Image (cartoon, grey):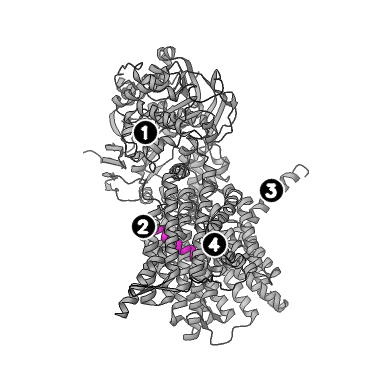
Amino acid sequence: MNRAIGVFGLICLVGALLAAPNYLGDYPTEVLFRLLIGVILAEAWNVLAGETGLVSLGTSSAVGLGAYVMIGLLNFTAVPIGVAIVLAAVAGALLAILAAPGLMRLRGLYFTVGTLSLAEALRLVMINGERFGGATGLFLNRDSPRMATLVRIAVALLAGAWAALMVARRSRIWVTLRAVRDDEDVAAQMGVRSFRVKIAVFAATSAVMAAAGAVQALKLGAVEPYGMFGLGWSVNTLAMAVIGGLGEPLGAVIGAAVVIVSGEWLSDYPQAHLALTGVLLIVVTRFAPRGIAGLSGILWAKLRAHRRPLS
Amino acid sequence: MSVAPLLEARGLVKRYGGLVALDDFSLTIGSGRVIGIVGPNGAGKSTLVGLLGGAIKPSAGRVLFAGRDVTSLCAAERARLGIGRTYQIPRPFLDLTVEENLEVAQCSRRQPRDSLARRRTEILERCELAAVRSRPARQLPLLRRKRLELARALALEPRLLLLDEVGAGLVDVEIAALIALISSIAAGGVSILIVEHILPIVRQCCDEVAVLNFGKKLSEGLPAEVLGSEAVAAVYLGTAHTVIETDFRGAAASAVGPLVGDGGQAVPPKPAQVLCLDRVSAFHGQLPALREVSLHVDAGEVVAVLGANGAGKTSLAALISGVLPVRGGALTIAGESAAHLRPDRIAALGVAHCMEGRRIFADLSVEQNLRIAARAVARAEVRRRLDAVHELFPVLAERGAAPGTALSGGEQQMLAIARALMARPRLVVFDEISLGLAPIVIARLYQALAALKHAGLAMLIVEQDVDRALHLADRAYVLDRGSIALEGSAAAVRADPRLRQLYVGGADEGNPVLSK
Amino acid sequence: MGGSAVIAGNVISGLLLGGMFALCALGLSLVLGVLRLVNLAHGVFLVVGAYAGFYWLHETGIDPLVGLPVIALAAALVAAPVYRLLIHPVMGRTAEAPMMTTFGIAVILENLFVLVFSADTRSIETSYSTAALTFLGVTVPRIYLIGFVISVSAILGVHWLLERSAFGRDLRACAQDPVAAATVGVNVTRVQMATFALGAACAGVGGTLTGLAFAFTPTSGPGYLLNSFAVVVLGGLGDVFGTLIAGIAIGMLQSLGGMVFGDGYRDLVALVIFLLVLVVRPQGLAPSRR
């Protein structure tokens, strides 16, 4: 019953989002697009770190790869946009699977540093590789779609990610992710093949991130290594997921809203915004380990406990 | 035609660096059999569970399960073949609900969802967890976490269950319920290996028992025979060796002067009582480690703390030195309240802790290991103390420049004792200094302790080797599952028949002390 | 003939630079070894050192090398309360919490620098920062040699501190067994704070030297951090001489890599070494000794 309501609610939300560009002005549509990309990335990162315990600073490697593959496919082949996005996602998954044998040997903090260096290494390859446009990057050889279309593509991607997440949450595998995060050794002792579980999650989330990068590239109409492989993607994604609440179902949405909206508010001072994000990150880590979503959950529970004697 | 055994361990060896945790151990577990493993602390019991479960890789030897060599298989693959285990200190997935904990263990089962759900319900009801099935495991109290350990292992549908100290931290009623549960699991045809120091469980559940000591199998047989034998009692009580009588009032006693007493620096007048615990409790996470323990040590007094494995002896030592936080009760050191002080503040109050396992700093030389404990003291005084400990243990002077861990086990223990003395403490807590050492070395160490006693140092001796400790002590306390079960003068405790029961348990009917 | 001189020049440049790399990485290694903390703000600390040198020269007109002790002291004095107030309260909670906090610090500092100092590329310009030195036909930048001498001296100084002083003894005890160290009377929190401060002081000096040798921007931090990480992984945790040798090895490999593949690939060399070492050593950065 609850599930039916959830699915219905989600369908309504997706419908509203698809219709939104018709009613919104240019600027709100643009913000909505950023918000959508933010939510997609934060959801993926939340599954990776919040559910499975793999704290990654390598978001930019998947985003950047997806963006480059997208532009490459559209420029040099005749594949339609939808197929190109899927292929970009496949590239993201392949990157994860190729990097996994090395990275997954590292536990905890070392995994984090490993992902960071992978991202930097890819960026340096892109800057130096003339075939990929070097430091100037590549331009899309046609016009980008209209903003409204881009928003709808992003909505479709998010809806797909959410649907996949719902299916995954219902599957028997899901509980093993959290078991691996909680205590990998005990999970192994219960028959969980933790190595495979981690690779599967890493590949799936990397695919989603690469698809987001592909949509972003489609919007920009150009890719260059400093932006698409920049640490900014990793910082923002991590900040959104952590501020919203790791492992919390609404965490990604709340976190993305806070980070993107404060970013618009401080749009003239992007550095001030990032510094504020850093402050929020420290404050949340210290005082609200389960993020804003976790904090509001606690407040809500308190409020209800407070009300109960009255009712 | 004999049936092949379910599990066979052949010549298992596990070395950690130079330490041999398990040495050439072989074991056979027949289908449907319940085997018990007993032995003192550090005998290698938990290592054995790790080796069979696949969490630890053996240095040598093989493990066969259901006729298949599983030595090279990792823990996950062995679990899928049907080896389930529980942990001594429960390790539930804290953020998962009770039922989800079981779902993890079912991850390898290829069955329809509803039949798995039915099976979970069955197990939860059997382990009396059905009422809390949708609560996060984090919220469960200890007893229920212990049950969850068992329930989760059962959800794996194991053919062999490895139970690591499932009884630790439970009270009598809970143990009785646990015995009933284990018996019913065994009745369902599951083979069980029980590693346990709560002997009533072993006595009532097991078909066979093996005794481990220093990583080797000492004896095996029927529970009644093995647990009743003098040899096993000796392993627990430490009478397996002859006490080497030594004259300790010789030259060494004068040497320790600079380490004890008031000479050399001005100390406040000696309080009559150096240590006092008033109804102190402590926990390891949720496990109660000590329950309302009251104990005191007067100036110049030597007090022994005895008790079986897991009775709370080392917890007591850790609590006194500030490593384990006090939860309830009062801890007073030399007249000052010390319940919430950091370890380094407690050290400054004059309590030195010679920790279990020696804890020598491998990166520091022998001399640096000694100097580090003499804090905020003039150079000349440090020199005096160094000379004194060198006279007590000359080998420390000879090997002063060597790295701390280049010493032999006995020498390392000497270093640990000397390091505690370098602080010139009011009270030294000696925690299991005889563990894993040869009798001749132990005699040498106790000779030094006797000299220190003679010089007037207050000591709290936590010791498995009952005979040794009582030989030196003025008074003794015996701990049983976190509470003091027996106290009095050393002679009175030694003569008390309950002492043996506390270690080995009653011959057949339960345990009079436990149920008093 | 000329070719071999160029190769020799590159090799020696790499060697000299490697000494600086080692000093830059030393703080990261110490903090990781003693606090078991991945200090993601370490790269930004190096950038702080570079700006400190830049503004020291700008404001006082005195040679930055003279200001090094002041910069080191200031870095330590600022880092100690940062550790005590921001990092220490989350230490022992989860493994990620302290690292996340250092990450937050890195993000804040990096962006504050852009706001305050602008994103412009800076370099500390002195008479010797661009001058070349020719010896036996081999030409290297003079600052490389100065940086090497100062770095190696500083590393030897830290080595002496760790091996001979009471603080070093306490530090090594805390790195190995904090519980036992506390029980013998060491104030572990204070030692941890001092280690963090010492790490920052090394970063301050290393950063100033880097700023003398190369141009830098507020966003140079992550690159510096990863370069230092490569040195730490290769050299072993908390091992001072290992760090020096690893720094020199990476400096030389970078120079050779830059020579063979082109200058843009210099930084990539360190990253590739880093990733390879991680894969070859599955225990990651864990100390090899027990």
Chain to which mark 3 belongs: A
Tell me, yes or no, whether dots 3 and 1 are on the same chain: no
Tell me, yes or no, whether dots 2 and 4 are on the same chain: yes
Q: For mark 1, what is the residue?
A: B42
Badge 2 crowding class, 10 Å Cα cut-off, few under 14, some 14 to 19, many 20 or more, is some
Camera-side mark, 1 or 4: 4
Tell me, yes or no, whether dots 3 and 4 are on the same chain: no
Label 3 secondary element? helix
Residue C122 falls in image quadrant: bottom right
Chain to which mark 1 belongs: B
Question: How far is the residue under mark 2 from the one under mark 4?
Answer: 32 Å
Question: Who's the residue at 76% across and 41% down the image?
Answer: A309
Disc on res. C281: 2
Farthest left residue in view: B1
Chain to which mark 4 belongs: C
Q: For mark 4, what is the residue?
A: C49
Q: Earlier in the sequence, mark 2 or mark 4?
A: 4
Position of residue C2 relative to residue A112, above or below, is: below
Q: For mark 3, what is the residue?
A: A301
Q: Amino acid at mark 1?
A: Gly
Label 1 secondary element? loop
Q: Amino acid at mark 3?
A: Ala
Residue in the foreground of this view, choosing between A101 and A191: A101
Question: How far is the residue under mark 1 from the one under mark 4?
Answer: 51 Å
Question: How far is the residue under mark 1 from the one under mark 2?
Answer: 31 Å
Badge 3 crowding class, 10 Å Cα cut-off, few under 14, some 14 to 19, many 20 or more, is few
Image: magenta residue range: C223-234
| Residues marked 1 and 4 touching at CB (< 8 Å) | no
Label 4 secondary element? helix
Q: Position of residue B508 (x, y in %)?
A: 39, 19
